[in-house]
Image (tube, helix red, strand yellow):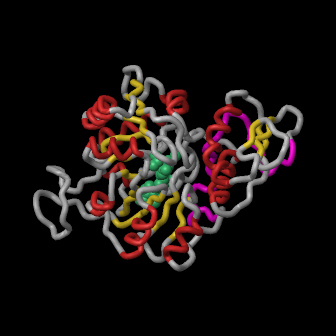
Amino acid sequence: MDNQPTEILCPDRAGLARAAALLARGNLVAFPTETVYGLGADARSGGAVARIFAAKDRPSFNPLIVHVPDLAAAKRYVIWDDRAARLAAAFWPGPLTLVMPLRHKQHGRGGSEGGSDGPDGHKIASLVTAGLDTLAIRVPAHPAAQQLLRAFGGPVAAPSANPSGRISPTSAAHVLAGLDGRIAAILDDGPCTVGLESTIIGLSDGPATLLRPGGLPPEQIEAILGRPLLRPVPDAPLSAPGQMLSHYAPGAPVRLNGDAARPGELLLGFGAVNCDLNLSPTGDLTEAAANLFGHLHQLDALGQPIAISPIPDHGLGMAINDRLRRAAAPRTAPGAGPIHPTNP
Ligand code: TXA
Ligand code: MG
């Protein structure tokens, strides 16, 4: 773990070069994406990836998403199919993660797969996939993320840049509040526009499956695929991994579907309600998604129980409700509970 103070870097030439150099030396760098800030490490270095788990205090090795700058880079690491091609063409770069079969590690030259990633071949550290034979991969749209990935020139493993189990970060200040002194640097480029983690689609095994609702509404994905996504049944322990895990949790208790604050509570509103903070006074789900984690951070700082207005369960509302259910779930030790792929 880093014992140095955390550097705050601007996304200019010098800042990007410094961030890339730190990554190349196996250090952790938080960087903005359009969804949330990620905590990046060189995905080919087991030691660097292990530092992610240590900095976040994540006791279990839940697999991580690998970030690459474009489709060509993604194809080096996963086995491509027609559905992936259509989804990538429609939504990359953007808030979509695809889980696909990992290419076998290649040593030295060769293979008919094309592409090479330097002397390491196609090596992704096995800690990234938690030993699975699938890989979660995404091409972020954020300009600073794009520039960092290109300056670094390799795959970057990155979970959200928050201590395990806490609210996800949508600004550099959120990252600093949770991880100051535990990571080498933060590339600060202001607030994230989408505000919810990427939607994760499983393509490795049978029909396309919604593994985690997120910043891209499932309806848009279904329109491109021309068929419904398989949706794991909520609360079925194996098919809906992590549904009951306490996560995104403020320090104080959270109560869902509150129409009004009870004595001592703060109300996080949605739509035309009397409240302490409003996710979207006009009832706009895109605005609510962008505000969700920032507003939770603000109310959390006041240390009182939080009630939250009902949110419609369609489009981005599905992902918002998923995060809110976890914020309200009974507390366990950080990271405890059924750790499975797709526990965000
Ligand atoms: O928007 C995002 O996705 C952000 C930004 C930084 O890119 N990242 C993020 O990462 O949310 P994280 O670690 O908080 O969530 C990654 C999720 C976890 O739920 C993990 O279980 C799942 O992806 N995952 C990773 N690899 C997987 C795999 N091979 N199969 C199934 N799920 C996987
Ligand atoms: Mg996370």
Q: Find out whether residue 272 is within the magenta segment.
A: no
Name the residue rendered at 56%, 53% in the picture.
338
Q: Is residue 125 left or right of residue 316?
A: left
Question: Split into 4 quadrants, where in the image is the N terminus?
Answer: top left
From the image, give the main secondary structure of the stretch colored magenta.
Answer: loop
Q: Is residue 275 left or right of residue 147?
A: right
Q: Residue 270: where, in percent of width, then height?
A: 76, 48
Q: Is residue 311 left or right of residue 15?
A: right
Write down the quadrant of residue 332 in the picture. Answer: top right
Q: Residue 20: where, in percent of width, then height?
A: 29, 36
Write down the quadrant of residue 42 in the picture. Answer: top left
In the image, residue 167 sits, relative to residue 108, either above or below, namely above
Question: Which region shows up in magenta?
Answer: 236-260
The one of 291 and 341 positioned closer to us in this rendering: 291
Instruction: Residue lying at the far right in this picture: please name it.
Output: 263
Name the residue rendered at 72%, 27% in the picture.
302
Residue 163 visible from this viewpoint: no
Q: Residue 97: where, in percent of width, then height?
A: 45, 59
Instruction: Residue lying at the far left in this picture: please name it.
Output: 109
Q: Find out whether residue 239 is within the magenta segment.
A: yes
Name the residue rendered at 74%, 54% in the picture.
311
Q: Residue 342: where, in percent of width, then height?
A: 51, 56
The one of 108 and 196 positioned closer to us in this rendering: 196
In the image, residue 283 sits, relative to residue 254, either above or below, namely below
Name the residue rendered at 76%, 46% in the picture.
281
